[in-house]
């Protein structure tokens, strides 16, 4: 039931505030941040994973495909930058033939909305074989993150963290990506807390920011409607589009480009802002719009420098920026603003305009947005 929405994809985009609420209700203990003195030294998370896992893991490897791989790339940033744990991400299909060198106390996390993607299951089977008794000195842990708590994945792993997004019908993943981010963020923060990479006092504002996310996603959704209609009309017929991001939003640039490819069939490329300058910038002209993900934060200035170069090459500029940076309006012909947010949490908001833009352009082009050509929701073979 689309509940009055024209398509499942749009309904699922609008369900994201509730999905975040549900995941936080499951994984964050209530009241931790309000009862300062009594509880700040206690663990605010509810992930139900063994203490030994948190104590012993020295490396994390993430295997996934498509949108789930992009959530893993955001998570890599959190595991490394918040918890200080070396983390690698590999496409599940590549992991099978070229696994990472196995290190002691590795946590392998397989991420799949469906729990049935063949390559991801093959990757987890390969990881399992390698941690067989013959190599048992290399203790390893297998964790699944999935939206299907009864799936082939859950049978294959030691532990599962469900993403609690409800059924996703649209082929282009939206709300399950959002739920994967919530689960990953809680996991990275629990590692950071237990390993004292973050003190309770440092953690408190981040937990408060997580609790504000549903409202902030709602605000983001409200702000996009009008400007996105205009952008979709202006760029409905382009053939190519570039999405740039830096730092944690590099992964969101990849995800935004994937959403555009899947639903609009526009050739969209996601790039790290800096890397784009090393050659691909030659692609730009007035027919190739550039979407720059430039929320306030440490990479803001370098993102603006990228966009100015893009502008000098004649590219029309769409900017995803924070409301607190009014100067952006002059740089970007088409600003899309998100509420002010800590840079590390910004992917929760910056992805939303990209989802809506892909959806709106697909509708504008008259395409079957819930069932794009040539792709299936779950690739089981
Ligand atoms: C693809 C879908 O085939 O599978 C993508 O078209 C999806 O949208 C990918 O991201 C991975 O799916 P899952 O279920 O493993 O997350």
Image (tube, rainbow, N blue to C red):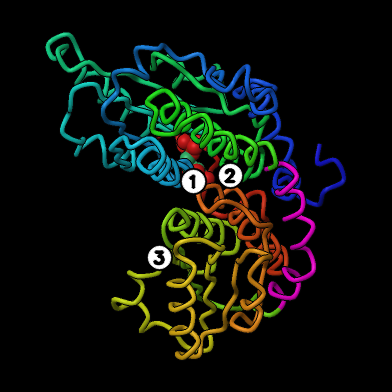
Numbered range of the magenta stretch: 213-233
Label placed on residue 173: 2
| Residue, far front | 37
Task: Tell me the residue that label 3 is attached to.
Answer: 271
N-term mark: 2 or 1: 1
Instruction: Pinpoint residue 78: horizontal percent, then vertical percent.
Output: 43, 41
Disc 3 and disc 1: Cα gap in Å? 15 Å
Instruction: Pinpoint residue 130: horizontal percent, then vertical percent.
Output: 19, 21
Q: Secondary structure at mark 3?
A: strand
Disc 3 and disc 2: Cα gap in Å? 20 Å
What residue is rendered at 63% in x and 17% in y? 38
Residue 222 falls inside the magenta stretch: yes
Task: Tell me the residue that label 1 is attached to.
Answer: 67
| Residue, far top | 133
Judged by its main secondary structure, the magenta piece is helix
Relative horizontal placement of residue 280, taking residue 105 as reference (left or right): right
Relative horizontal placement of residue 235, taking residue 94 as reference (left or right): right
| Residue, far left | 134
Q: Where on the picture, by quarter, is residue 280?
A: bottom left
């Amino acid at each position: 039931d689309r509940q009055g929405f024209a398509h499942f994809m749009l309904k699922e985009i609008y369900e994201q505030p509730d999905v975040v609420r549900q995941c936080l209700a499951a994984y964050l203990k209530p009241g931790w941040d309000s009862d300062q003195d009594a509880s700040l030294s206690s663990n605010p998370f509810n992930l139900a994973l063994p203490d030994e896992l948190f104590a012993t893991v020295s490396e994390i490897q993430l295997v996934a495909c498509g949108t789930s791989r992009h959530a893993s790339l955001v998570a890599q940033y959190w595991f490394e930058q918040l918890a200080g744990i070396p983390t690698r991400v590999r496409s599940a299909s590549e992991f099978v033939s070229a696994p990472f060198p196995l290190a002691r106390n590795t946590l392998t996390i397989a991420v799949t909305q469906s729990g049935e993607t063949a390559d991801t299951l093959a990757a987890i089977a390969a990881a399992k074989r390698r941690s067989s008794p013959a190599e048992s000195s290399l203790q390893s842990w297998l964790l699944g993150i999935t939206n299907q708590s009864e799936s082939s994945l859950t049978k294959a792993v030691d532990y599962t963290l469900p993403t609690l997004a409800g059924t996703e019908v649209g082929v282009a993943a939206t709300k399950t990506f959002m739920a994967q981010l919530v689960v990953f963020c809680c996991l990275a923060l629990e590692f950071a807390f237990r390993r004292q990479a973050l003190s309770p006092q440092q953690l408190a504002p981040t937990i408060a920011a997580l609790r504000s996310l549903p409202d902030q996603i709602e605000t983001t959704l409200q702000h996009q409607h009008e400007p996105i209609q205009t952008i979709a009309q202006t760029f409905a017929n382009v053939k190519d589009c570039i999405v740039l991001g830096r730092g944690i939003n590099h992964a969101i640039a990849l995800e935004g480009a994937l959403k555009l490819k899947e639903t609009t069939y526009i050739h969209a490329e996601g790039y790290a802002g800096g890397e784009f300058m090393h050659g691909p910038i030659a692609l730009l002209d007035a027919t190739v719009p550039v979407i720059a993900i430039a929320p306030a934060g440490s990479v803001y200035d370098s993102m603006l420098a990228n966009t100015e170069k893009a502008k000098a090459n004649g590219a029309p500029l769409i900017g995803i920026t924070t409301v607190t940076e009014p100067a952006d309006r002059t740089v970007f012909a088409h600003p899309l603003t998100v509420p002010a947010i800590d840079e590390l949490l910004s992917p929760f908001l910056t992805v939303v305009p990209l989802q809506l833009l892909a959806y709106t352009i697909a509708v504008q082009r008259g395409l079957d947005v819930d069932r794009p050509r040539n792709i299936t929701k779950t690739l089981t073979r």
